[in-house]
Amino acid sequence: MLLLGGLLIKSASAQSDTCKQRYVKTPTGYLMVLREGDNVFAEIEKLAVREKVPAASFFGLGFAGSAIFGFYDFNKKKFNPKEFKRVEMGSLTGSIAWSEGRPSLHMHGVATDEKFQAFGGHLLSLAVGTGSMEITVMVHDQKRERKVEQPLNANVLQLPSCEGAR
């Protein structure tokens, strides 16, 4: 903060520390800038609820303090998780749909460590590390649902009926 001519003025860095805004509207959807400690899944879900996003695709990049990937075990019908800390998300991609009245996210990514080794796949959890994570959300015009399908017990994005589908 600066004292200038008897007026107390907050510096830009002090303002950004207290800023709670996580996204802005764009012509095609939203641009999110998430900060250290933010839960990426929770912030995207909040956006979907607040803005009544019918469905969307998203992509992003940035630094992750923690990324938990899961590899699906088809026999056990569950994900085997593996956590990576302090990694760069070189690529983040996913979709927003709805399931039982709540946002349903499907997210994949590729992360690299300090040795430039890459790890990737289905994300189960993602927290922003030092710095930020930038995510572009492209909104679709029609609502989409996810439903659990068997025999894999997988949550699958549903398309309109087959009539007229290509």
Image (cartoon, grey):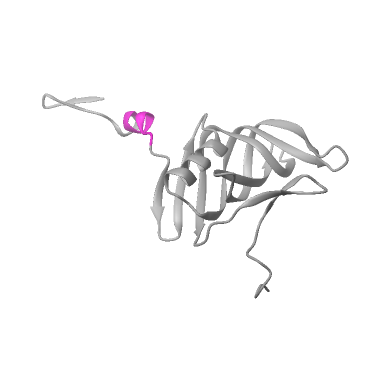
Q: Quadrant of the C terminus?
A: bottom right
- Asked if 58 appears above or below 35 in the picture, the reply is below
66 or 4: nearer the viewer: 66
Rendered location of residue 148, percent (x, y): 71, 47
Rendered location of residue 7, percent (x, y): 14, 26
State which region is magenta. Answer: 14-20
Q: Residue at x 22, y 25 (%)?
A: 2
- Please, which residue is most extreme toward the right here? 75
User: With 55 as the anchor, is 164 left or right in this view?
Assistant: right
Which of the 4 image quarters holds residue 158? bottom right
User: With 50 as the anchor, is 3 left or right in this view?
Assistant: left
Can residue 130 be seen here? The reply is yes
Q: Residue at x 52, y 41 (%)?
A: 45
Q: Quadrant of the N terminus?
A: top left
**Does residue 17 belong to the magenta stretch?**
yes
Can residue 114 be seen here? The reply is no
User: With 57 as the anchor, is 78 left or right in this view?
Assistant: right
Q: Residue at x 25, y 29 (%)?
A: 10
Q: Residue at x 53, y 36 (%)?
A: 42
- Asked if 106 appears above or below 43 in the picture, the reply is below
Rendered location of residue 156, percent (x, y): 70, 52
92 or 97: nearer the viewer: 97
**Does residue 35 belong to the magenta stretch?**
no
- Please, which residue is most extreme toward the left here? 5
Rendered location of residue 144, percent (x, y): 58, 56
Q: Main secondary structure of the magenta part?
A: helix
